[in-house]
Structure formats: C-alpha cells, structure tokens
Image: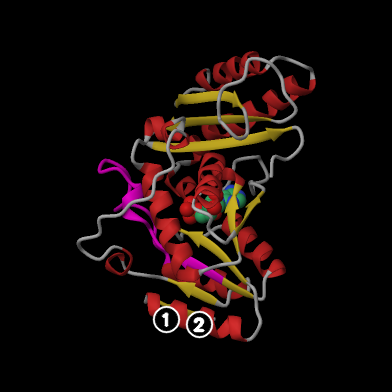
Amino acid sequence: MDVVERIDAVRFAVAAARQRGLSVGFVPTMGALHVGHGRLIEVARKDCGYVVVSIFVNPTQFAPHEDLQQYPRPREHDLELCERLGADLVFYPPVDEMYPPGALTTVQVAELSTLLEGAIRPTHFRGVTTVVAKLFSIVTPDRAYFGQKDYQQQLILRTMVRDLNLPVTMQTVETVRDADGLALSSRNAYLSPEQRLAGLCLSQALQRGEQCYRDGHPPDEIARIMARDIEQTAGVNLDYATVVDPWTLIPLTTPQATMVGLVAARVGTTRLIDNAIWGPSPF
Ligand code: AMP
C-alpha cells in the first residue's frame, strides 16, 4: 500500500494502475476509521482492481464553532486498517495541498443543501461538494463509495455527479451498526457511556418507525411518533425526525413506495444522525 500526500503522486499512481488495465474505486473519508468505513473499503476492494482511500479532515465543511480542531486523527490506526483491508493507495494530503491560498471556486448543490442537515449547518454541504469534486478530479475514480449513514450527503453528491456529468458511478453502502443498533460514527468517540446509551434512542426510534410503516401508518404520523420517542429521552435534544421522499427530501403526508426516515439529535455537544429506507431501494 502506498501513502502519498501530494496530488501529483495520486495522479501518477492512478495512471499506472490504469495502464495495467485496473478499474479504480475510491473511498473518501475524514479518517478516525471504524468498521463502517471498513465496509466501504471492502466493497470497493471486491468491485475494483485498484482501491484509493482518502483521509482528509476537510476544514471547509466545519463551521467556526464546530469540532474541526477536536476531530480525532489517529494516523497509524487508520493506515493499518486501510492496509489490512487491502487498499492500494491512501491519499493523506495536508490542508494546503487541497486548499492553496487564493482558491475562489466552490461547488454547491442548490436546495438539497439547505434542508435538514443544511438548515442546521448552512455551509456544511458546500464544503462537502467542493472537496469531493476536487477529490474526484484528482483521483478520477470509476466508482466512488459512500455510506447510507449520511443519507442526505450521498444524495447531494449523486446530484452533483449528475448535474456536472462527472464520469463516476456512485455506490451507496448500507449503514454498519454496533450490536445494539447504534450507527457507527467517528463522533461516537465523544460520547460517555451514559450518553452512548441515550444516543440509542435514534436507532430505536427508526425501528419503531419501521414497525409503524409496516402497520400502514401515514408518514407524517410516523415522523411525530419518532420525534416524541427521541424528545422523551433524557439528555437528548431533538433536531429533527421526519419521513421524506428519497430524492427530494420533502416531508411526506401520504405513503409512497419508498420513504426515508431521517433523525438527528444532540447528545450533550455531540450531534448524531441516523436514517432508514422503507420500501424498495432508491439506488
Ligand atoms: P466520514 O469519515 O465521516 O466523512 O465518512 C466517510 C464515509 O464513510 C462516508 O461516505 C460515510 O457515509 C461513511 N460512513 C460513516 N459511518 C458509516 C457507517 N456506520 N456505515 C457505513 N458507512 C459509514
């Protein structure tokens, strides 16, 4: 496995892989890798001849009051995991390699970036789409792998790829959870044992939502039930609980073939998000 910090080195390695006739799979991450990230790498490994992982804590997707400085950066652990799962190349750029002084260009997906997570974190998705557009331009992958865990993020990135005609196939990989149902997240490391227990209310609300969906309850009622369950959990502050259309993220009042339940809450100062797809997969 090669570990490189420079854009030129990525281009060189990917060109060599292509010359060998290999397809290129790409897993962008912010590091602090866990089994959820690992699953993306495993799926990419199965699909593609050459697997690139990027590890970059992208400053432009953090607001000034958010946890950019505090975000965990366990370099050796992350590189070991990539190696063990068979990544071929890790791109580990310093900030000034990705954002040299004077950059003026951003990429923004309108509307979808203003809803839900975007309503709470207004500049977040512009940072995500800009850095992923840059990473796609550097790595030029055939396929790129994202987690369903960040449902809105993968939808916005799919929309960017469609709208900008980027030559990459987007793959969304199911959320990996701990045995008790908590969705794996790098930010779970911030939780005390009590907070972690409280945070379980998100996946539990989604499970209750799924049962209501099976029982034929209308989506707006399911959203209210999930919201109430989360609000009633001590130590948890609800940001939203909603049931939406998988492509527009518009809240639903009447049932349709595929619906997505999305929940977000704060446990102490840590924000947790989770979701579930009900009905046939939208991808
Ligand atoms: P991050 O490092 O948080 O930017 O995440 C990098 C990628 O891993 C994103 O596509 C996430 O959606 C994905 N991811 C994060 N947590 C999980 C999880 N529990 N299961 C599957 N994918 C995940």
Please name whichever residue, 113 or 277, is drawn nearer the observer in this view of the structure: 113
Q: Residues within 10 Å of mark 1 (few under 14, many from 20)?
A: some
Query: Residue at the spot x=30%, y=54% of the render?
Result: 105
In the image, residue 195 lies at what x, y percent? Answer: 48, 35
Which span is picked out in magenta?
A: 52-74
Q: Is residue 82 above or below residue 280?
A: below
Residue 53 located within the stretch drawn in magenta: yes
In the image, residue 262 lies at what x, y percent? Answer: 57, 31
Q: Horizontal placement of 273 versus 107: left or right?
A: right
* Contact flag, marks 2 and 1 (Cβ < 8 Å): yes
Q: Which mark is residue 13?
A: 2
Secondary structure beneath label 1: helix
Badge 2 residue CB within 8 Å of ligand 1: no
Q: Amino acid at mark 1?
A: Ala
Q: Is residue 246 above or below residue 14?
A: above
Query: Residue at the spot x=63%, y=15% of the render?
Result: 253
